[in-house]
Amino acid sequence: MYFGKVEVTGVDTSRLTTLSDREKKELLRKSAEGDTAAREKLISGNLRLVLSIIQRFAGRHESMDDLFQVGCIGLIKAVDNFNTDLDVKFSTYAVPMIIGEVRRYLRDNNSIRVTRSMRDLAYRALGVKEKLTTELGNEPSMGTIAKELGEDEKKVTAALEAISEPLSIFDPVFSDGDDSVFVMDQLSDKENTDETWLEDIALREAMKKLNERERSIIKMRYYGGKTQVQIAEEIGISQAQVSRLEKSAFARMRKNM
């Protein structure tokens, strides 16, 4: 195996080595300084990462050997373009680079035809995206990519969508032994955050400490959408009493939370 043309045919993947985070950092530093031996060791030590990523494409009837070679090209690009000054794990940077290279290969061999001009624009956009990701340390917005290209943002978005492929949220993007990272793990959810989840638990626990009448009023008022007057009529007390019980319940809940 040598890493100019990325010849990987016949590699015994069961014997692929792995590197610790400390070893990766040291090899990345040396590689950035021009140490070719460190560069080759770094590439060799991350071939398991390539192997784990291409497993997600196994059902496409593509040659796994070809995909492995293509994935290695992405790995080499990640090694050569990684900015050691940024506080980013190498795998965080390398995974999308490898996936991007494999997807580019699959798009080139896709039976669905896309116009040449749209494909060229999409590839230019991908190139700019990779360049800006390296420079900025994070993924640029579509507007930033379009501005760099001097193209309309909607046109660039349409071009990239035209060459994209459907993706399942259950597709793995990285696997290290029994620990896998799936697409769904990388999706953000602004509504169901850890803070919201913890607040819901605290709220339920505080509700349990109310007496039956207070709990009933809070449920009807804020889960059932009823007014104090409607609640008063339903349980047979005055609206003023409902208001006092509601305030008392809130005071106890705040104390318990």
Image: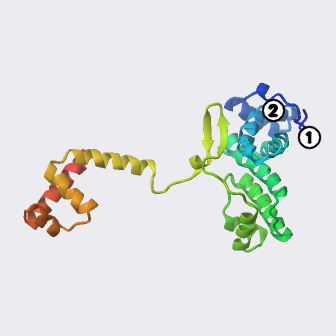
Name the element at disc 2: helix
Q: Say which residue appears at 9% left-offset and 65% top-offset.
A: 240
Q: Earlier in the sequence, mark 1 or mark 2?
A: 1
Q: Position of residue 211 (x, y in %)?
A: 15, 48
Looking at the picture, tell me which residue is in the foreground, 207 or 43: 207
Q: Position of residue 151 (x, y in %)?
A: 76, 73
Q: Say which residue appears at 89% left-offset and 35% top-offset.
A: 9
Disc 2 crowd rating (10 Å Cα; few below 14, some 14-19, many 20+) is some
Q: Eyeballing the image, is 157 above or below 180?
A: below
Disc 1 crowd rating (10 Å Cα; few below 14, some 14-19, many 20+) is few
Q: Eyeballing the image, is 215 above or below 116?
A: above
Residue tagged by mark 2?
A: 44
Q: CA distance from mark 1 to mark 2?
A: 13 Å
Q: Quadrant of residue 114?
A: bottom right
Using the image, tell me which numbered label, if any, was put on residue 149: none
Q: Is residue 83 visible?
A: no
Instruction: Name the residue type under label 1.
Output: Gly
Name the element at disc 1: loop
Using the image, tell me which numbered label, if any, was put on residue 4: 1
Instruction: Name the residue type under label 2.
Output: Ser
Looking at the picture, tell me which residue is in the foreground, 101 or 230: 230
Q: Quadrant of residue 191?
A: bottom left
Q: Is residue 157 visible?
A: yes
Q: Position of residue 196 (x, y in %)?
A: 40, 51
Q: Say which residue appears at 83% left-offset and 70% top-offset.
A: 115
Q: Position of residue 188 (x, y in %)?
A: 54, 53
Looking at the picture, tell me which residue is in the foreground, 90 or 246: 246
Q: Say which residue appears at 65% left-offset and 43% top-offset.
A: 172
Q: Residue furthest top?
A: 15
